[in-house]
Image (cartoon, coloured by chain):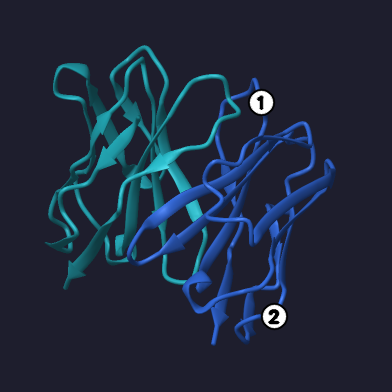
């Protein structure tokens, strides 16, 4: 059983470039979460979706960040333009609303903006 | 606003010794509590969770945690650690409902001495 899939696993880009991170949740899960992990701030919730609808994006740092979930099996997190302070590990997690409420995490995307 | 405090940034334990990692939370209602483990370069794996009922919960890999409402604590324990337990451990709190984001502590880095 395939867990949460994230791509790419590593991304190195230059400041000002657009970055798109991708996530495929576990089949049958209807909630999807994007988190960011940095040494300074730890793990922070950026945004989450229920049934493909964004519910809370209060954690999105600024307008340069956007997230979409066009269908139940795919989500993207886009940063445009990217800045060095966006360097972090970005995790996607999914869960089944109404179930045991366990969030399953993907392996993460390590983003480096130079 | 909910918060989680893990007072120990690093803990060093000898292999075979017992372990206790501390976690204190702040939450206005009955919390859902979790412990996750992260190995280097990996995503987060759920060790155990508490929703209600018995305040002593058992998890995977021989871990257990005890919920103490009066102390707002949810400490993680293991009677005898193995070298493979070396990792980063995160405590998290979330509201009920099965589809809301989690608030994580900053993590405790566990080092195992031979």
Residue B34, placed above or below residue A68: above
Q: In the shown orientation, is residue B22 left or right of residue B89?
A: left
Give percent across and percent down for residue A86: 52, 70
Mark with earlier residue (1, 2):
2
| Residue A33 in sight here | yes
Give percent across and percent down for residue B72: 20, 25
The local secondary structure at tag 1 comes to: loop
Q: In the shown orientation, is residue A12 left or right of residue B63?
A: right
Q: Which residue sits at x=79%, y=37%?
A: A52
Q: In the shown orientation, is residue B77 left or right of residue A84?
A: left
Image depth: mark 1 or mark 2 in front: 2
Q: Quadrant of residue A41?
A: bottom left
Mark 2 belongs to chain: A
- Residue hosting label 1: A97
Q: Quadrant of residue A55?
A: top right
- Furthest toward the right, the residue is A71
Spot the cyan chain and give its letter: B
Task: Give the colour in which the image draws chain A.
Answer: blue
Question: Are the residues flagged by discs 1 and 2 in contact, CB closer than 8 Å?
Answer: no
Judging depth in this view, the residue of B16 and A22 nearest the camera is: A22
The quarter of the picture where the N terminus of chain B appears is top left
Judging depth in this view, the residue of A111 and B33 nearest the camera is: A111
Mark 1 belongs to chain: A
Q: Which mark is residue A17?
A: 2
Estimate the spatial distance between the alpha carbons at disc 1 and disc 2, rounded to whole Å.
35 Å
Q: In the shown orientation, is residue A104 left or right of residue B48?
A: right
**Residue under disc 1 on the same chain as residue under disc 2:** yes
Residue A54, placed above or below residue B109: above
Question: How many residues crowd mark 1 within 10 Å: few (<14), some (14–19), many (20+)?
Answer: some
* Tally of marks: 2
Question: How many residues crowd mark 2 within 10 Å: few (<14), some (14–19), many (20+)?
Answer: few
The local secondary structure at tag 2 comes to: loop
């Amino acid at each position: 059983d395939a867990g949460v899939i994230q791509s790419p696993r590593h991304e190195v880009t230059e400041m000002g470039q657009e970055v798109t991170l991708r996530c495929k949740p576990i089949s049958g899960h209807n909630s999807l979460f994007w988190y960011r992990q940095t040494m300074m701030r730890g793990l922070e919730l950026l945004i989450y979706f229920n049934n493909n609808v964004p519910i809370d994006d209060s954690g999105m740092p600024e307008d340069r960040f956007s997230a979409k979930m066009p269908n139940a099996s795919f989500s993207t997190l886009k940063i445009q333009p990217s800045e060095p302070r966006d360097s972090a590990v970005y995790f996607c997690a999914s869960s089944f609303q109404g179930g045991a409420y366990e969030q399953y995490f993907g392996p993460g995307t390590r983003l480096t903006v130079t | 606003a909910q918060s989680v405090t893990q007072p120990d940034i690093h803990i060093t334990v000898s292999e075979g010794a017992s372990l206790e990692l501390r976690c204190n939370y702040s939450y206005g209602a009955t919390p859902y509590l979790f412990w996750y483990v992260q190995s280097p370069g990996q995503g987060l794996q759920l060790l155990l969770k508490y929703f209600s009922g018995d305040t002593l919960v058992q998890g995977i890999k021989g871990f257990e945690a005890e919920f103490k409402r009066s102390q707002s604590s949810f400490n993680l324990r293991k009677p005898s650690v193995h070298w493979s337990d070396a990792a980063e451990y995160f405590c998290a709190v979330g509201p009920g409902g099965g589809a809301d984001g989690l608030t994580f502590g900053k993590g405790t880095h566990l080092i195992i001495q031979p």
